[in-house]
Amino acid sequence: MPPALASNRVEGLNRTAVLVGLMGAGKSTVGRRLADRLGVQFVDSDSEIEIAANMTIPDIFERFDEQYFRDGERRVITRLLLEDPCILATGGGTFLPSENRKIIGKRGVSVWIKADLETLWERVKDKTSRPLLNVVDPKDALSNLLNARYPLYSAADITVHSAAGDSHEIVVQAIVEALLKYGHLSTDSVGKDEL
Ligand code: S3P
């Protein structure tokens, strides 16, 4: 790895990096670390929806329905993408409606954190906060979501892989390198000298 890329000397995010992918991909954890690394704000669209609705996501699904949640999701990402470039972690369903993909494509750069079923399952199996996995066979549900959604996630501008044993730092590094490659970040003068 070139020294400048291993250091903190990357800056100038010129578009919001929108992290997409299935539940358990690590969008929030990776997103927080990536935002720290780049010195920009981290925003989680699920948390923003909960704040706007003053309710948890399981409550929104229970008291209203999934469509109500999806409408909130669209409003939240539309608003956030009008703000300064930041790292935006989205919920697993955000990148699926074509309208959302269009908004993200116009103002952001989409980054799919791709992981296989076993890796995702290991990360989500003990959590109860995901209504779509609150079913008799949650692993089967996750597998069905993977099959249905991966073709759509593959439309993201950037794809990075998150394997079972990978630290989140490896994924952060892969995203930084891809953002540099596609011109969404720059290295500062010290970094350039070192390259
Ligand atoms: C969903 C994923 C969740 C949350 C909601 C729906 C989905 O977010 O938005 O439960 O459709 O995959 P995470 O991907 O952050 O778990």
Image (cartoon, grey):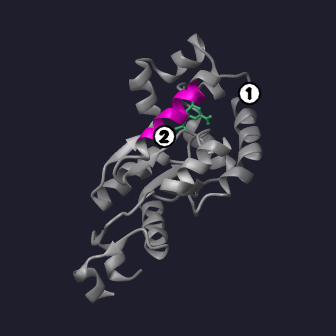
Residue assigned mark 2: 77
Q: Magenta part of the protein: which range?
A: 69-79
Dot 2 or dot 1, earlier in sequence: 2
Does residue 164 appear in the picture of this structure?
no
Which disc number belongs to residue 116? none
Query: Alpha-carbon distance for marks 2 and 1?
Result: 31 Å
Q: How many residues crowd around disc 1 within 10 Å: few (fewer than 14), some, or many (20 or more)?
A: few
Q: Is mark 1 within 8 Å of ligand 1?
A: no
Estimate the x, y position of residue 93 in percent, counting from the top left.
62, 38
Which amino acid type corresponds to the residue marked 2 in the rendered image? Ile
Q: Quadrant of residue 111?
A: bottom right
Q: Quadrant of the N terminus?
A: bottom left
Residue assigned mark 1: 137
Helix or strand or loop: what does disc 2 sit on? helix
Estimate the x, y position of residue 17 in percent, counting from the top left.
45, 56
Estimate the x, y position of residue 91 in percent, counting from the top left.
54, 38
> Could you say which is closer to the camera, residue 36 or residue 179?
179
Does residue 80 appear in the picture of this structure?
yes
